[in-house]
Amino acid sequence: MRDLLVLFLSVKVNDLATRKTTFVQLVDGRAVAIREAVGTYRTPDLVKNVARQWTILTWTWDSKLPGTSKPDAGQKVGNDRLTTTAYLASFLLQGKTKPNGSSFRAESRNAIAQLTPAGVFSGSTRSTILISYISEPRTVAPGRYEVDMVATRNVIDQSGRIEEIPFNRTFVLDAVDIPQSPLGKDATDVERAVYNVREAGLEITEIKPFSPNQP
């Protein structure tokens, strides 16, 4: 599983060595502790980057683990499978349990797994996503942000045919505590990959349709 940790060396949304009570993001994306009053502030670039990274990790499909020659067997979700990158990216989604016993994270995993063809894991189907626009984030409440995205998914079958699928969405993100693994150096590669992807101190709470031409 060491490949999972190598994978996230190139896609980490933040770099933080220790957990503190409150943070502010620097221009290079790192977080530093400051006064408690600004603990929910996240820079516009960081907010946009979390939405961007979730999108790229979720919708880039390949039969290999990125950066390796090893096949991606995926992760089981019900009767379907998610790519490993999509599964790890799902930890950027809110995992709080709803009254119905589910969560936004679990519901999204199920929906995306159902959209993932079995051919992805054999190499007969591939997917890329091209992001053409990300808006400046809007602060809708203390520690809550919205950002709009215009993108196109390109699903490529074995014959080389490309299906273009618009992916225009508004992301709602909340500032959250930045976690630190209680296991430290004893954490597994998977655990470290999960904590790495959460180091931005943001989680996506909603992804809803966005109409670019709507006034």
Image (tube, helix red, strand yellow):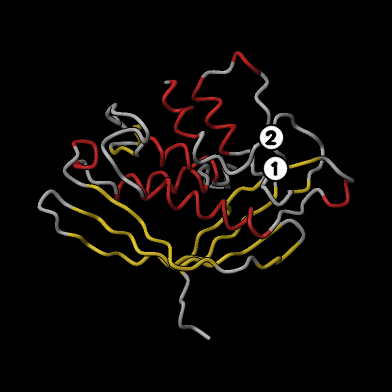
The relative height of residue 28 versus residue 10 in the rendered view (above or below) is below
**Label 1: few (<14), some or many (≥20) within 10 Å?**
some
Q: Position of residue 180 (x, y in %)?
A: 68, 28
Q: Quadrant of residue 160?
A: bottom left
Left or right: 1, with 68 as reference point: right
- Quadrant in which residue 161 is drawn: bottom left
Q: Tell me the residue at 19%/42% (across/down).
A: 119
Of 15 and 60, nearer the camera is 15
Furthest-left residue in this view: 159
Q: Is residue 187 above or below residue 151?
A: above
Relative image position of residue 192 (x, y in whole percent): 56, 26
Q: Is residue 172 left or right of residue 83?
A: right
Report the residue at 60% width, 39% height from top.
198
User: Outermost residue, front direction?
Assistant: 28
Quarter of the rendering occupied by the N terminus? top left
Say which residue label 1 marks.
30
Mark 2 touching mark 1, by CB under 8 A?
yes
Dot 2 or dot 1: first in sequence order is: 2
The residue carrying mark 2 is: 16
Tell me residue 214's x, y (percent): 49, 83
Above or below — where is 12 with respect to 209?
above
